[in-house]
Image: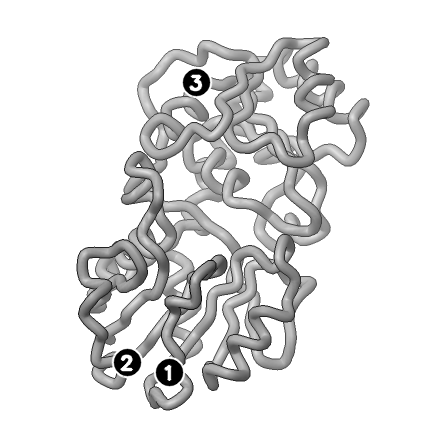
Amino acid sequence: MKTIIIQEHSRHKENVEYRECMSLKRAFEFHGHEASVWGLGHNNYQDTPDWNSYDLIINIENYDETGWVPDLSSVKTTKFIWAIDAHCKGLNSYLETFTNGKYDLILQSTPEFLTDNSVWFPNCYDDDMIKPLSVEKEYNVGFCGNINNRGYLIDSIDRQFGIRKDIFVLGDSMVRSINSYRIHFNANISIDINYRNFETIGCGTCLLTSYNRHYEMLGLRDKVNCLIYSTENEMLEKIETALNEDDFRKSLEMSALELAKYHTYKNRIKIIEEILK
């Protein structure tokens, strides 16, 4: 199968190889498929692809600010959209692109937004780039990401336990940071199940994350391979338990690492292969 992936080049040099398009490309190639990437900022952007020469086009550009994504309505190749951020943007812009571009399917990362024209395609992690490292667990609790709606919970953890804050840390530094925590705090935005869930278990670090009703379907189970909280008090209690009981925390890490194998980009390609059969 010959696939082309549409997404803007990373605006941050540290994150180039961690960009979704690059991870997806490697995953396709792992399964023996031919894959390329095209979009604003890439070296090949000035060369318009022969869209009809591909077996599959995947558009994962969620934030086109200048209208550079081409109109593919006349292209006969099978076309998918991967809607990663519908929980932030809403569904309308994806449906508009789907209709106007005559796409075949929406790969939807948020189950609540599933329609007749979409399938659930959960977020995942790149096991070529994200993995356990031989680094010291320097910090009891850490947070790697953007504050967004998480500030009051981060402050609450900081008051009781202290927390390492790695704000907008990207690429290899992100992986090293997550590996340096005993517990990695996460709070999903709205109804999504964000990348940090999968990146954390892929690093072999204990995941502490906010409740989502779809976790069970993904194999994420409270006190089995992660810690899931619904309230601030529950969050603090679970941190205390995990820090005081090393064997318990390490059992969560090991179970999560086993689960992580099912949530790689390589594994997600199998979903696409099944759809195209």
> What's the CA distance linking mark 2 and mark 1?
6 Å
- Mark nearer the N terminus (2 vs 1): 2
At x 72% / y 51%, what residue is drawn? 213
Q: Which amino acid type is shown beneath numbered disc 3?
A: Ser
Q: Which amino acid type is shown beneath numbered disc 2?
A: Asp
For label 1, the crowd category at 10 Å Cα-Cα, with few meaning under 14, some 14 to 19 and many 20 or more, is some
> In the rendered image of this protein, does residue 41 appear above or below residue 208?
below
Where residue 73 sits: x, y (%)?
42, 86
Q: Which of 272/95 is in front?
A: 95
Q: Which residue is mark 1?
A: 78
- Mark nearer the N terminus (2 vs 3): 2
Location of residue 8 (image quadrant): bottom left
Q: Which residue is mark 3?
A: 180
* Left or right placement of residue 166 versus residue 161 in this view: left
Q: Which of 256/167 is in front?
A: 167
Where residue 53 sits: x, y (%)?
21, 83
Q: Which residue is mark 2?
A: 55
> What's the CA distance linking mark 1 and mark 3?
43 Å
Q: Which of 259/191 is in front?
A: 191
Tags 2 and 1 touching, CB below 8 Å: yes
